[in-house]
Image (cartoon, rainbow, N blue to C red):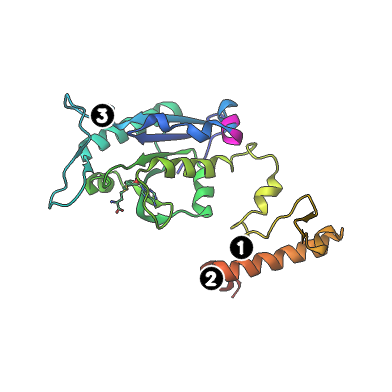
Amino acid sequence: MTPKSDNSPWMATVLTLFPDMFPGPLGLSLAGQALKDGVWSLETLDVRDFATDKHRTVDSTPFGGGAGMVMRPDVVDAAIGAALAGVQARCGSADVPLVYLTPRGRRLDQARVKALSDGPGVIILCGRYEGVDERVLEARDVEEISLGDFVLSGGEPAALALIDACVRLLPGVMGSDQSLAEESFESGLLEYPHYTRPQDWQGRTVPDVLVSGHHERVRDWRRQQAEKITQARRPDLWARLAGEKE
Ligand SMILES: C[S@@+](CC[C@H](N)C(=O)[O-])C[C@H]1O[C@@H](n2cnc3c(N)ncnc32)[C@H](O)[C@@H]1O
């Protein structure tokens, strides 16, 4: 994959039946400001524009029977072709990850987000109905990514989440690199608990160590808390960390 060049912003190209869902929340807050500032860019392609019949049909019934409809390979393929041609025209290369968001994909994690964010951008195919015809996924060698073990009604909310996670890692988007460095998953651990004012809220006080002024003790306490939380809530992460240490 070509690394991000300095003069072309990181770009998300979204193939969707609902382009009006974008930028949605990505037009607000940090991601929205960065979009306005040209730190990243967003393009949506309406998959329906690639239908070839007068009814602009994008789906059909599944071979073998069963409930629901399936997105047609010819229509999706034409949309992917147009997205790749657009990337090629803008960047001089179409070497960009092509992702289909689906519950059966590899579970998204921060390492994949980081890798995507370090690249030139991403093309994201949002499914609807029962999903997309398998043949186009094979033919285009699409990477399948899941947001988690649950089923959304479409890929668009997952695309918004994926883009948000990538954009906030782009240089200059977050105020402080320090806050990124201490976040969940950065060290393989979940994050320690946070506290702010008031120091006493409804009789619940802030742990003494956090108001002690001892930076080293605060650091140790946070590390212990992060380990305790990770061990209790995510034994899978804890086991991986233990394996890495061995
Ligand atoms: C109703 S879902 C289809 C679910 C599919 N029939 C299945 O059982 O795996 C429609 C679309 O939502 C998106 N989607 C649903 N859940 C998702 C998840 N957990 N992660 C990523 N995308 C998801 C996918 O693009 C999918 O094609």
- Mark 3 / mark 1, whichever is N-terminal: 3
Q: Is residue 136 magenta?
A: no
Label 3 CB less than 8 angstroms from ligand 1:
no
Note whether 35 is above or below 198 in the view shown. Answer: above
Question: Which residue is the site of mark 3?
Answer: 50
Q: Residue drawn 38% across and 45% down?
A: 99
| Circle 2: residue type | Pro
Q: Is residue 116 visible?
A: yes
**First to last magenta residue range:** 29-33
Question: Which residue is the site of mark 2?
Answer: 235
Q: Are marks 3 and 1 in contact (CB under 8 Å)?
A: no
Disc 3 crowd, CA 10 A, few/some/many (<14, 14-19, 20+): some
How far apart in space, not on screen, are marks 3 and 1 (Cα)?
44 Å
Tag shown at residue 18:
none
The label nearer to you, 2 versus 3, is 2
How far apart in space, not on screen, are marks 1 and 2 (Cα)?
11 Å
Looking at the rendered image, the quarter that the N terminus falls into is top left
